[in-house]
Image: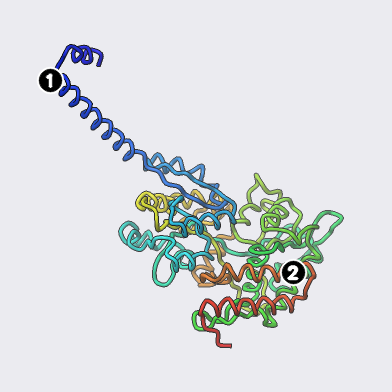
Amino acid sequence: MNNFRSTSSHRSGAGHKARRGFLVALAGVAAAAGMSGAMAQERSIVVTAVSSFKLIETLVPDFVRETGIKVDLQVLPYPQVRQRSIADFVSGTANSDVYAQDIIWLGEWAKNGYVRPLDDLIARDIKPADAADFLPGAFNALSKWEGKTWSMPFGAYYFLNFYRKDLFDQAGLKVPVTLADVDAAAEKLTDKAKNQYGISMPYQRGGPITSWFLSTYTGAGGRLLKNPPTDFTPTLDSPEAVAVLKHYLGWLKFAPNGAIGHHWNDQTVAMQSGRLAMAPSFSINGTEFAKPEVSVIAGKVGYTTMPRLTAATPPVIPFGGWALGINAKTRKVEDSWTFIKWLTSAKVQTSLAMLNGTPVRYSALQDPAVQKLYPWVAEIMAAERAGRVFPDYRPRYPFYPQIEEALGLELNNAALGKISAEEALKLANDKVRKIIADAGHPMLK
């Protein structure tokens, strides 16, 4: 370069100016080409998800090495994911290319076109044999709405009653089948002097108490809505719902101090630390009971389906979980899809299964190491094949977030003793009827 500059410095006149102009232009073209090349090589996406996705951080470097696509994984608390996603969708800014989608947001996101349908990409890239490896209940519940696929399932959460096998054996108790069985076991296994409590549930207003109560109601044999899509009549004022809520509130007598304000995370910690005999919860939380590195009760945990009102009632497993959707406004569809395919692949799902026990594929559930660490996956596979998985215990319709707020308020008021179980469910049922009516859905009652 110095030699070239030295040579060109001796030139003069028009020829010199022309030559200099040509070199400047050529340099500009080269610089632009270089920038373009750098931009083409620097591929990246932003992924926004809840705290349970933190487990994938150790696996993401593998994806980056395989694809060259950088991933900005933004892990946030649940309420913030909700707020950020809706703000992004409504504004059309595409601050995140991929969003984690809770099962209860599916109808809302699909109806409003917040995420991109994936059917064309699935048909192009996922072979039938590979598609058949996905758990059908999980796939349909988490990702399919009104004939289209709006997301890909990531984590399948099954609601079970986790209990301390050692404590039940020492007390000569059988595995609880009915709500009355749970009451009796909780009373017998509560010893406050030993800091041991029979059972604890979330009672915090909003999502915690609503989700856990509806899981209990559904497991007992109830349904929040009578028979959608033909009849959306809510059943919260039914004798069955009132009976279930009285049991749910009664369990406060056998719970640790402060349980009235507990979130599901508080329940998880109480069980992990050996203070609870029973902790009905999602399987994602059950995995935390089974890991020796974080739980003092590892190896002592049993599991069963949720208690029913009567033993004759068929068992059912309430279902929840998370999926991954592509922001409808992103320009990075292919890179986003590449990431989603990778994260939901059989290989990665099996790796994740050892960490969180919530894979969405049969092949991962059938892995011997997974079954040894999380023995309840056998129950999950059987329930999937028998169709005993129920995803609409929290209806996936766009109006559900309003129901959660309305019902959560009244349930919490009942837990605080401000109103009776009957009053709480009558008030909630009236509010839910109005929400459904405003949404334009039929109610036959």
Colour option used: rainbow
Q: x%, y% of residue 429?
A: 65, 78
**Quadrant hosting residue 131:** bottom left
Give above or below for 167 relative to 427.
above
Residue at x 66%, y 71% (from the top left corner): 407
**Residue at far right of view:** 193
Can I make out residue 365 in this image? Answer: no
Q: Amino acid at mark 1?
A: Gly
Secondary structure under the numbered disc 1 in the rendered image? helix
**Residue at far bottom of view:** 445
Q: x%, y% of residue 103?
A: 52, 64
| Numbered label attached to residue 15 | 1
Q: Quadrant of the C terminus?
A: bottom right
Of the pair 168 and 424, the residue shown nearer to us: 424
Give above or below for 427 relative to 148.
below
Of the pair 239 and 364, the residue shown nearer to us: 239
Nearer-N-terminus badge (1/2): 1
**Residue at far front of view:** 13
Of the pair 157 and 439, the residue shown nearer to us: 439
Judged left or right of residue 337, residue 188 is right
Judged left or right of residue 109, residue 269 is right
Give above or below for 423 relative to 137.
below
Q: Amino acid at mark 2?
A: Asn
Q: Quadrant of the N terminus?
A: top left
- Disc 2 marks which residue? 413
Residue at x 67%, y 55% (from the top left corner): 265
Real-space Cα distance between discs 1 and 2? 89 Å
Q: x%, y% of residue 267?
A: 70, 57
Contact? badges 1 and 2 (CB < 8 Å): no
